[in-house]
Amino acid sequence: MSEAEQQSQRRCVSCGINVAGMSAATFDCPECGTQISRCSKCRKQSNLYECPDCGFRGP
């Protein structure tokens, strides 16, 4: 999958919206390294997230 295809499929792990083109944060899971994306709204509200691979939870 190309980088452009990956970016078009990025979804916020907290609320599920498509985050392509938004001021979202993408980072590696502290436990397993899986790439996690979060939208700016969920980040600002400190909504909890859960890694889809290992189940790590964070604010």
Image: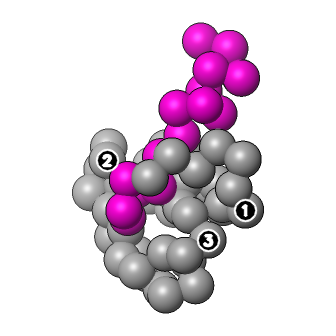
Q: Which mark is residue 10?
A: none
Quadrant where the N terminus lies? top right
Q: Label 3 crowding class (10 Å Cα cut-off): few <14, some 14-19, many 20+?
A: some
The residue pinned by badge 2 equals 52
Can you say whether 3 is above or below 27 in the image?
A: above
> In the orientation shown, which residue stands out farthest toward the left?
55
Quarter holding residue 22: bottom right
Amino acid beneath label 1 = Ser
> In the orientation shown, which residue stands out farthest toward the bottom?
45
Colour basis: one colour
Q: Label 1 crowding class (10 Å Cα cut-off): few <14, some 14-19, many 20+?
A: few
Q: Is residue 35 magenta?
A: no
Q: From the viewer's perspective, is the residue at label 2 or at label 1 nearer?
A: 1
User: Is the Cβ of the residue at disc 1 closer than 8 Å to that at disc 3?
Assistant: yes
Can you say whether 10 is above or below 42 in the image?
A: above
What separation in Å lies between label 1 and label 3 (alpha carbons)? 6 Å
Q: Label 2 crowding class (10 Å Cα cut-off): few <14, some 14-19, many 20+?
A: few
Q: Position of residue 43 (x, y in %)?
A: 55, 77
In the rendered structure, which disc, 2 or 1, sits on the residue that comes first in sequence?
Answer: 1
Can you say whether 20 is above or below 25 in the image?
A: above
The residue pinned by badge 1 equals 23
Amino acid beneath label 3 = Ser
Q: Secondary structure at mark 1?
A: loop
What separation in Å lies between label 2 and label 3 (alpha carbons)? 19 Å
Q: Which mark is residue 40?
A: 3
Q: Is residue 28 visible in this depiction of the protein?
A: no
- Please tell me which residue lies in front, 27 or 19: 19
Can you say whether 10 is above or below 54 in the image?
A: above
